[in-house]
Amino acid sequence: MAWFGCGHALRDLKRYHEAIYCYDKCLELQPDFHWVWYTKARYHTLEGNIDLALESLNEAIELIADRYTELAKTEPIFDALREDIRFQKLIPN
């Protein structure tokens, strides 16, 4: 939880790259922490790392499909991904 909290603090400072580092550390300890995968997808998107964003979003969806599919449909941060065919396959309308 310490790495998770550190990631959130860095997020608040808009230091997304460093926040992602903290979330990666969190996932080393708890690889099924679904919310961290979803959060990483959001921050990768903000950084313009589309491939990594889609990979992280896929991980979250594999863990809890209904929840993260529905969240991703309305997440404004993912507007940058909506035209990508990979996003469209992952998040059907």
Image: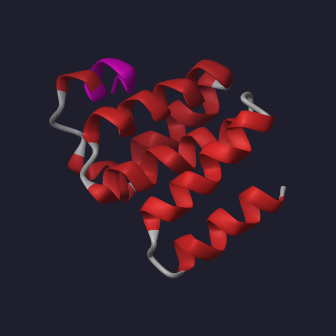
Q: Coloured how?
A: secondary structure
- Could you tell me residue 64's position as x and y percent? 67, 26
- Could you tell me residue 86's position as x and y percent? 26, 22
Nearest the viewer among 28 and 11 is 28
Quadrant of the snapshot with the N terminus: bottom right
Q: How many marks?
A: 0
Q: Residue at x 27, y 40 (%)?
A: 50
Quadrant of the snapshot with the C terminus: top left
Q: Is residue 72 above or below residue 16?
A: above
Q: Which residues are magenta?
A: 87-93
Q: Residue at x 51, y 63 (%)?
A: 18
- Could you tell me residue 51's position as x and y percent? 29, 32
Residue that protrudes farthest toward the bottom in the picture: 13
Q: Is residue 6 above or below residue 31?
A: below
Q: Residue at x 63, y 50 (%)?
A: 23
Classify residue 10 as left or right of residue 90. right
Q: Residue at x 45, y 44 (%)?
A: 41
Instruction: Tell me if residue 74 is in the magenta stretch.
Output: no
Instruction: Tell me if residue 92 is in the magenta stretch.
Output: yes
Q: Quadrant of residue 10?
A: bottom right
Q: Is residue 78 above or below residue 50?
A: below
Nearest the viewer among 81 and 17 is 17
Classify residue 66 as left or right of residue 72. right
